[in-house]
Image: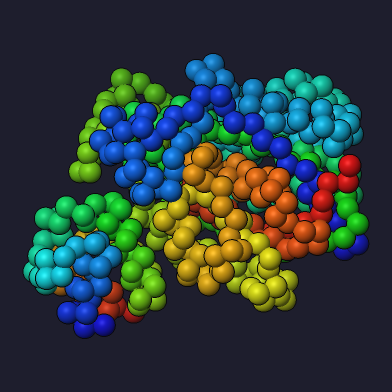
Amino acid sequence: MNLQEFIQAFEEALELQAGQVKPDTQLSSIERYDSMGRLSVMAMADIKLGVVLDANALDRCATLADLHALVQKPA
Amino acid sequence: MNTTRWATVEAIRSYLPEKVVTNADLSPEVGWIAEEILAKTGISQRHVAGANECVSDMAVQAAEKLFSEGHTDRKAVEFLILCTQTPDHYLPATACLVQHRLGLSTQCAAFDINQGCSGYVYSLGLASAFIRSGMAECGLVLTGDNYTKFINAKDRSVRTLFGDAATATLVRTGQGPGLDHFVFGTDGAGAKNLIIPAGGTRLPRGEQTAQLVTDGSGNTRCQNDLFMDGPQIFSFTLKRVPELLSGVLARSGLQVTDIDWFVLHQANRYMLDHLRQKLKIPPEKLVWFLERVGNTVSSTIPLAIEHAAAKGQFREGQLLFLAGFGVGFSWGATLLQWTHPRK
């Protein structure tokens, strides 16, 4: 999944408007990226990419681009 | 092990504390409207034990139903396994108090096991071992917890989720395969993710442990309170629950399509629904009982089974897959072949 597709999936998972976030958007600035939001992203990565994200690695991601890089890594 | 000697689940009864806390009750304290709580958790209300209501009180209430309804005579009970993480005392075991209050034989084995979400499966495993080894013919598996007594009123990450309950399961020798193909697992590296840090010998309660701290999500708690890291728990379930199912299928030689019902630990609706999709469980095969009781820890699975059985959902001989997973991290699963109560 390329970065643009990932951002689209992220926006869908968090019920954000299309185009609301960019690769360099700080995750901490996204109100819906709370505890529930993180679960939604983990669920999206699991179902769409077959990737089970480590919660610690997730917390180390600062931007959307970081998150995309994380889901690309082999388990 | 005598392969022709089987342990079966005869009957399950439950007790729910009288006090009910609805989402509307919680809303002013957690800052979410009632509908929001329901949407996030799948829970609309939870039962909360009274201030002086302990696990022994609740467990006795559940177990008495098995006797009053004629499922067994109390003197026939040869073992009592009580699964709880919120015992009446450090010692003696709460099971001993329950043995006395139920008037069970003094020849009865009675002990606690300290497990949470996986606890019902662990307890059934022990009960099955007691019976299949020939040590006993008949016993009780009780579950009971008062997690709500350890939840900070200002911690919405857990306040909306947990409820209190107790259940009593009668396990006895049976004619055919009842409980079989147990799979267990543990990863203590996850211990810190669902924990009450203080109150044991590692960190006794004191002034320091009562200091309130508000985290980045606005949840307030102290070390005497329950702490749960939701994303860590979710990551754990995504990894381990599929292994549980594949493990049980490998042991039994069955396919997932051979299983009639899936009874998973009822943690919250979001997690459960995601697991259903991930494991490719048809929606109609997933047994639900969460909305009106919340996450009752080791009682979630027996409560769900009791509720479904009362609706006539199970047919004689149908296969139920039971899976508990969570605090520890600890996980366990088994197959249960359903038999209608003998009486």
Frontmost residue, B277 versus B109:
B277
Residue B35 relative to residue B93: left or right: left
* In the image, residue B298 above or below residue B178: above
Q: Residue at x 77, y 59 (%)?
A: B315
* In the image, residue B93 above or below residue B188: above
Frontmost residue, A52 versus B96:
A52
How many numbered discs? 0
Q: Residue at x 44, y 57 (%)?
A: B271
Quadrant where the C terminus of chain B sits is top right
Q: From where the camera sits, is residue B88 visible?
A: yes
Q: Quadrant of residue B160?
A: top left
Q: Residue at x 11, y 55 (%)?
A: A29
Residue at the outermost top position:
B52
Q: Residue at x 85, y 37 (%)?
A: B71
Q: From where the camera sits, is residue B200 visible?
A: no
Residue B202 on image: x %, y %:
43, 33
Residue A62 relative to residue B44: left or right: left
